Amino acid sequence: MSFTSPSVEALVEQLMRLPTVGRKTAQRLAAYILKMPREEVEALAQALLAVKERVRQCAICFNVTDEEVCAICRSPRRDHATICVVEEPSDVLALERTGEYRGVYHVLGGVISPLDGIGPDDLRIRELVARVAPTNGDPERAALYPEGRVPRVQEVILALNPNVEGDTTAYYLAQLLKPLGVRVTRIARGLPIGGDLEYADEATLSRALEGRLAL
């Protein structure tokens, strides 16, 4: 069933382009937008346009930002000797919510997936290696950092999803980075807090056993 208004139907069609939004959800959203005050609709439209006009990728870590360099990479309070590698900007948000990590990030833009036609050259792996390689010869690059020099990276943490593509990408990165004299680690995998052994799958239990800690 379609709206009798072509304008509303056009809005529904556009909303359906969003991920996980089906026709019924799009119709509910369109109906809600119709009830919104005009100034709120204008604010929403302006926010959408601003995202496309102002948001760019950080020149260092490729996270989303309104500036050339994001706030995390600009901060002198962050540990620039530790880089956490993630797949997407949303992963940065997830890690920042913990309040535990004080290093910086590197957003790959995905993972190696031959079935989807995504290879190493399609990701920001070359840029990661450039950050880790011990060189300070580029003054333009050094000027992007808080102290005006490229920091010497000591550890790279691979925070990639625990699936086939994530494992493949992690292995590939480890083979590239280890010869550079940097410590390469990966976030632990295992049982979630509040989980039940009875309902855990074999792969999760195996990872939990491999990553066991002394008490």
Image (spheres, rainbow, N blue to C red):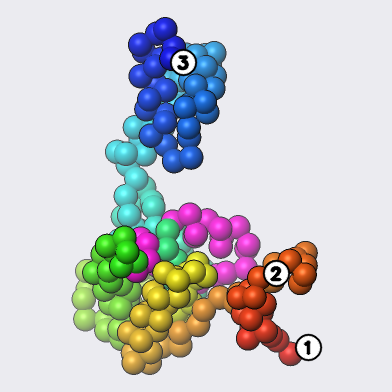
Quickly name the residue at label 2.
200
Quickly name the residue at label 1.
215
Quote the CA–CA distance across marks 1 and 2. Answer: 23 Å
Q: Earlier in the sequence, mark 3 or mark 1?
A: 3
Residue 72's spot in the image, x, y percent? 46, 61
Q: Nearer the viewer, residue 155 or 178?
A: 178
**Rendered position, 18 above or below 119:** above
Quote the CA–CA distance across marks 3 and 1. Answer: 61 Å
- Helix, strand or loop status at disc 1: loop
Q: Which residues are magenta?
A: 89-112
- Helix, strand or loop status at disc 3: loop
Q: Earlier in the sequence, mark 3 or mark 2?
A: 3
Q: Tag 1: Cα neighbours inside 10 Å, few (<14), some, or many (≥20)?
A: few
Residue 125's spot in the image, x, y percent? 30, 72
What residue lies at 50% left-to-right and 82% top-to-bottom?
185
Task: Give the amino acid at mark 3.
Answer: Met
Q: Quadrant of the C terminus?
A: bottom right
Q: Residue furthest top?
A: 4
Quote the CA–CA distance across marks 3 and 2. Answer: 43 Å
Q: Earlier in the sequence, mark 1 or mark 2?
A: 2
Task: Give the amino acid at mark 2.
Answer: Ala
Task: Give the amino acid at mark 1.
Answer: Leu
What residue lies at 45% left-to-right and 75% top-to-bottom?
167
Residue 105 shows up from this direction? no
